[in-house]
Amino acid sequence: MYEKEYILIKKELTDALLVANAYIDEVESYTAITAPESTLGTILSEQTKSDIKLKQFYKKKRKLMFFLDKLPDVSSFLCVNCKQIIELDRLLLMPKASFCTKCASES
Ligand SMILES: [Zn+2]
């Protein structure tokens, strides 16, 4: 049951996780090194910007891991109304969403 959906959701989650991991790796590697000619103000403002973004990606990664854990229960990723897969972007914003965007906007 839901084998096709399982594969699709798993691929989407894994892809998103790869993107998040690549971003985290990249930012972690360059935040440790700051150009010696940078002023302290520049260093701090650059770090703050990347820190905020990094935190967003950590949060996203935690959610993706949570979804992957939950994935064996494919039905929790499907819209209770139309049985289509709920969009990942929507789940990331509302992990407990039980309707797809279309059904939610029609209700
Ligand atoms: Zn729906």
Image (cartoon, rainbow, N blue to C red):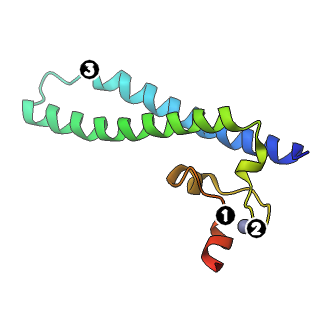
Using the image as rendered, state which of residue 53 and residue 80 is in the foreground.
80
Please identify the quarter of the rendering in which residue 14 is found.
top right
Examine the image and state in which quarter residue 15 appears. top right
Q: Secondary structure at mark 1?
A: loop
Q: Would you name the residue on which mark 1 appears?
A: 99
User: Where in the figure is residue 62, as x and y percent of width and height?
Assistant: 51, 34
Mark with earlier residue (1, 2):
2
Real-space Cα distance between discs 1 and 2?
Answer: 7 Å
The percent position of residue 81, horizontal first and vertical second, equals 76, 67
Amino acid on which disc 1 is placed: Phe
Ligand 1 rendered quadrant: bottom right
| Camera-side mark, 1 or 3 | 1
Cα distance, mark 1 to mark 3?
45 Å
**Amino acid carrying mark 2 in the image:** Asn
Q: Residue at x 73, y 44 (%)?
A: 9
CA neighbours of label 1 inside 10 A, class few (<14), some (14 to 19), many (20+): many
Residue contact between numbered discs 2 and 3, judged by CB atoms under 8 Å:
no
Front: mark 2 or 3: 2
Given the image, on which type of amino acid does mark 3 rest? Ile
User: Which residue is labeled 2 in the image?
Assistant: 81
Q: Is mark 1 within 8 Å of ligand 1?
A: yes
